[in-house]
Amino acid sequence: MPAPPRLVCGVRWRLCALAAAALPAAVAAQAAPDAAPPEPPPRTVQGYVIGAALVDGRDPVGQSARTSTLQPVWGLWVGRFRLSSGGAATLWGVGREALVDAGLSTTLVRRSNASLSAALRWDEGREADEDDPLLRGAPPVRGTLRGWLSLGYAPAPRWSLSLGGSQDLLGRAGGAQVSAGLSYRYPVSARTHWDLGGSIRAGNTTYLRTVYGLSPAAAARVGRRPYEPSASAEAVQLDWRLVSALDRDWVVHGGVGVSRLVGAAGRSPLVGARQVWSAQIGLAYRH
């Protein structure tokens, strides 16, 4: 016997309702495999460098002897900012994207062949040393925080120009400095390169009198002639450096350099050696 028309309609309506309820779930299940996975949250710490370097050299001021010291090499990269020692600043790039600047630094502007960066760096200063005949009477040089602005420009492949300036931010008679440099990079392989660079530094009157000068009052106290230099060039420097990535994480580096004091700095009675040589070799781990 055929079902009554009202019963047939009721069954059909129930089937349609069940199908309508199940349709969104079926569509979602079919679309799920093709949906893009959610992006992971950004990393706070994007990289670090840690290692050590054996450094041999001497201070041109005073009668200090040559010393060989084991110095830490470290750096931390967080977001747009990098905090690194001078040695670590040159190790970020080899075998990876280049990111170079010492101190607490950030890149303000970057173009295809030029960049402008800012940095904060601590200047260690110098202790008083009455036992050193060249430093007798010279007051200590207080450590201070320097603000740096640096402009880098690559005029041609393998060549780079740099221009920078700094100012004492704590008012500790640190004065102002400027520097300019030219360097050439030779890629030995994808993981190894050497750099040859030359630079010149200069300082204003405040900086040169603090580091290389002897005030009339200090000179009279110890029976020496005063020396009050004015703004001039400070030093010229030539460096050769080799950096090689043993793998993606381990880097070995080394180099030699020579620096010569010029101008008012070279004529200072506090200077024990106008020209000094330095050498270093080290190993670092990057992540």
Image (cartoon, grey):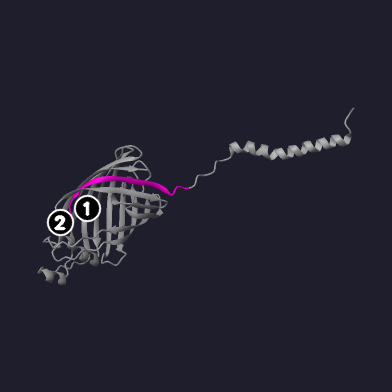
Q: Amino acid at mark 1?
A: Gln
Query: Is 49 colored magenta in this rendering?
Result: yes
Q: Which dot marks residue 222? A: none
Please give the name of the residue rendered at 32% of the width and 45% of the height, measured from the top-left corner: 50
Please name whichever residue, 50 or 30, is drawn nearer the observer in this view of the structure.
Answer: 50
Q: Quadrant of the C terminus?
A: top left
Q: From the viewer's perspective, is 138 left or right of 243?
A: left
Q: To which residue does mark 1 refer?
A: 237
Q: Which dot marks residue 274? A: 2
Query: Is 54 colored magenta in this rendering?
Result: yes
**Relative image position of residue 185 (x, y in whole percent):** 29, 44
Residue 222: quarter of image:
bottom left
**Relative image position of residue 233 (x, y in whole percent):** 22, 61
Please name whichever residue, 183 or 140, is drawn nearer the observer in this view of the structure.
Answer: 140
**Relative image position of residue 245 (x, y in whole percent):** 32, 39
Q: Main secondary structure of the magenta part?
A: strand
Which SS class for mark 1? strand
Please give the name of the residue rendered at 20% of the width and 61% of the height, measured from the top-left corner: 127
Q: Which residues are magenta?
A: 42-61
Q: Quadrant of the N terminus?
A: top right
| First reached walking from the N terminus: tag 1 or tag 2 | 1
